[in-house]
Image (cartoon, rainbow, N blue to C red):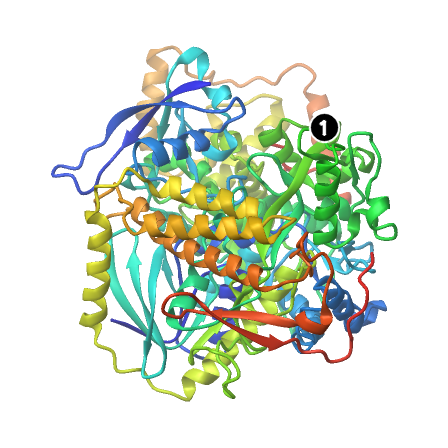
Amino acid sequence: MQVTLKVRRYNPEAEKPKDYWQEYNVEVESAGTVLDALIKVREETDETLALRCSCRSSICGSCAMRINGHAALACKTRVSAVAHQGEPVTVEPVGNLPVIKDLVADFQPFWDKVRAVQPWLQTAGPEPEKEYLASNEAMMHLAGVVNCIMCGACVSDCTVLEVDKNFLGPAALAKAYRFAADPRDAATSQRMGLYNQYGGVWDCTRCFECVQVCPKGVAPMDRIMALRERVMANGLKDTYGARHTEAFTEIIEHSGRLDELRLPLKTYGYTNIPKLIELMPVAIRALAKRKSPPVLHKSIPGVENVKRIFKKVDQLQKGDGKVSTEKAPPKP
Amino acid sequence: MYDHDVLVIGAGLAGMRAAIAAHQQGADVAIMSKVHPVRSHSNAAQGGINAALTDRGDSWEDHAFDTVKGSDWLGDQDAIEVMCQEAGDELIALEHMGVIFNRDGGGHLGTRAFGGQRRARTFFVADITGQALLEAMYDQLMRWEVRSYEEWFCLELIVAEGRCAGCVALEVRSGTLAVIRAKAVVVATGGLGRAFEPTTNALICTGDGMALAYRAGAALMDMEMVQYHPTTLKGSGILITEGARGEGAYLLNKDGDRFMECYAPSMMELASRDVTSRAEQTEIDAGRGVDGCVMLDCRHLGERLIKERLSQIHEIGLDLAEVDITKEPIPVRPGMHYQMGGIKTDVEGRCWDPQGRWQGVEGLFAAGEAACVSVHGGNRLGANSLLDTVVFGRRAGQAAVDYSQSTGPADLKETYYLAQAKERLAQMLERNSSEDSVARLRLEMGKAMDQGLGVFRDQQGMEAALSRVLEVKDRYQRVPVRDKGRMFNTALIFALELGFMLDCAETIVRSALERKESRGAHFRRDYPQRNDSEWLKHVLLDAALEVPRVAYLPVTITRWPPEKRVY
């Protein structure tokens, strides 16, 4: 089939380096991938087109790029799936990382963040003579995260990183989870302190982009949520994030619906005057648009059933701990 | 000029294992790779890593015998003994490093069956074993802050004062040239699959290290031994793990028969790879294939097992072949997969012989697929490659440290090497006249190698391949590089890689023409029998002026004299 690739190019050696679009028409096999098409361009039309690629089977993580606006592996994306009715397929470098040339991005900030989560096993006591004992279930749960090929697709489309470069980001935090959840690892409290910091687990806005674009089903956001649970279970509750979570839960348990007036007050603290002043403009705008929550918050009918749900969850958690966000990732 | 005690070139499993070992011995070690280490091709090893654990009733001797038999008695038995004896400790070291192996019901490391072996001794992480190991190794590099030259391309090994003293390299991003001086150099750059088309190998597997060492004066050994893997996808040549057959998948011909019954009645689908590939090709040639393929049937394994243990290939089937392996058989055929041969080393990874029995370069070490110790001989067993990388990677790293302590840095004229390299690159970038392209030349070479040096070979076919390779080599001298920039010039990299591949391809054909018998992966229709009286020996090639020089070394036999090889 015939396809038009619209590639965002950038030549760092141009007199005035500036990105621009270039179109290429390519003939690919019906089952051909975007990577096949790009390689064909590079081999037959334009040797100057720079991109990284290697394995052709979604395992090396080299060829993440934005295809029609969303991050994906070029080798895993069929042309037929993205070329809608002869429309050109747009191809751009991954987002949230500086571009070096054409589709090649600078991954140094990516790796700096991965390293910052201390991604190595830290065991306690003398090493056993043989292997550490661990359940197959626990190891295969981790395999769901080890599946991560560090391609950067999640980082590319992370909406938090777009506005806050300090955020560790989905890939590094998923990697953090892989060690935090390893039954052999003994550095839990130190890790929790690290991941609880500014730029850590609480900065995720749960937008689901990383879950959507991950080519390996790692579901980084779910891992971040699981880390939040672990951080709080470790007694680290003195963050806005943790207090927000607790306040949210308390309110729902109490009345069955969210009390939007009390949620920020409980999160930031009734006496946190500077923070509350910061919120004033929001409150005023809400008032003006008649969107302000009622001062008298009413419980929903049948709220006692909600309380029973909470009780049940509590019992289960004390039992086998099966109620948790640490679920198996969805299959890609 | 950069300076280190030990420089490791290549950052896959063998290279990283070498670097970690060197670091643990307190050396100033640096590692260099043309890609980021986690992009290395080791991550494509799906199935697992072999180790015979005595506390499970297995024995290293059994593992060694299976390896010797798998190698068709071409593997050096002293080296095989070392590998199999050290497998258990190395496996535990990997687990302690953090690798998440599959477990059995008691929480101990679990095993699966693999080809050519009488016991299930393959330890694994689902079907992402290579990736899981690679991750754990890179984590160690990060932890110990080992100096890592990432996306640096090695142009040439420097030989000075009679030994390897470092290299000249190109920083891909900036296009800057640099000399890296080292007291010892370890080459662990992996395989050369891209010299064939198609291949299971990644685009980066271009035989760089083998060619670099060869040009520097080292010998390449057993280069004719090229493994064709029995289960690769048609067209792209993408790998379907042997783990599928290890878990019990069948190979069927067009009549739905498990044809391996006729070729390997006791081991069936789990016969050695060369045997299975030949059986498949025979079926296909006899008209019992399906569109040039045979069928790999996983359906009876059940969806649950497939999704837990073979999820990566389930995904590959869906993505690249439009086949759901839980519901239908997937067409596969033999495809170029692995180079058993490589830079001749001893069991310490040394690429020279202190006794001078073979041509080599002092101060140079090699490990992994780039090297030939030789443990794989004529045919590598599945899951022995990962074992090879970690055992001999570690040994090479340690031996390189020992060597570096016995010597000082060589006196190198940095400007001389830089000027020479600059001149060479400039010359490549200036070419404009030819209509040829690097991609076209590579394809021609690859097709010629696949046709002439595939599962079945003969004199005529190999001679045709040789003349084709030499013709391409000639045109290569004039092929233009059409990107003239400095920064991230991938066109220049591909041109340099093609030069490496052509050297490798030539040595493969010349070695294959040399060996006038059939052994392991080298099956000649014109010499269909194994001939132990004349050919129980290795073929070595080293670079001479016009044509490579041929030498022979006897195979080391310790306790397993040659036998008939039946599966």
In this view of the protein, which residue sits in the foreground, B42 or A97? B42
Task: Please report the residue visible at 52 percent of the width from the left and 35 percent of the height from the top.
Answer: A214
Q: Is residue A248 above or below residue B271?
A: above
Quadrant in which the C terminus of chain A appears: top right
Q: Is residue B304 above or below residue B228?
A: above
Asked where in the image residue A179 lies, by quadrant, the reply is bottom right
Question: As drawn, is A91 to the left or to the right of B271?
Answer: left
Judged from this view, the residue extending furthest toward the left is A15
Q: Is residue B193 visible?
A: no
Q: Is residue A138 above or below residue B99?
A: above
Asked where in the image residue B252 lies, by quadrant, the reply is top right
Q: Position of residue A51 (x, y in %)?
A: 36, 40
Which of the chains bears the disc numbered 1?
Answer: A
Q: Is residue A305 above or below residue A71?
A: above
Which residue corresponds to mark 1? A309
Q: Position of residue B131 (x, y in %)?
A: 57, 51
Q: Position of residue B258 (x, y in %)?
A: 83, 39
Q: Position of residue A193 (x, y in %)?
A: 49, 55
Question: As drawn, is B245 to the left or to the right of A230?
Answer: right
Asked where in the image residue A100 lies, by quadrant, the reply is top left
Of helix, strand and loop, which one carries label 1? Answer: helix
Question: As drawn, is B427 to the left or to the right of A223?
Answer: left
Task: Please report the residue visible at 33 percent of the width from the left and 40 percent of the height from the top.
Answer: B437
In this view of the protein, which residue sits in the foreground, B150 or A186? B150
Q: Tell me the kind of residue under disc 1.
A: Ile
In this view of the protein, which residue sits in the foreground, B340 or B187? B340
Task: Please report the residue visible at 70 percent of the width from the left and 42 percent of the height from the top.
Answer: B281
Task: Please report the residue visible at 32 percent of the width from the left and 84 percent of the height from the top.
Answer: B161
Q: Is residue B404 visible?
A: yes
Residue density around tag 1, few if under 14, some if 14–19, many if 20 or more, within 10 Å: few
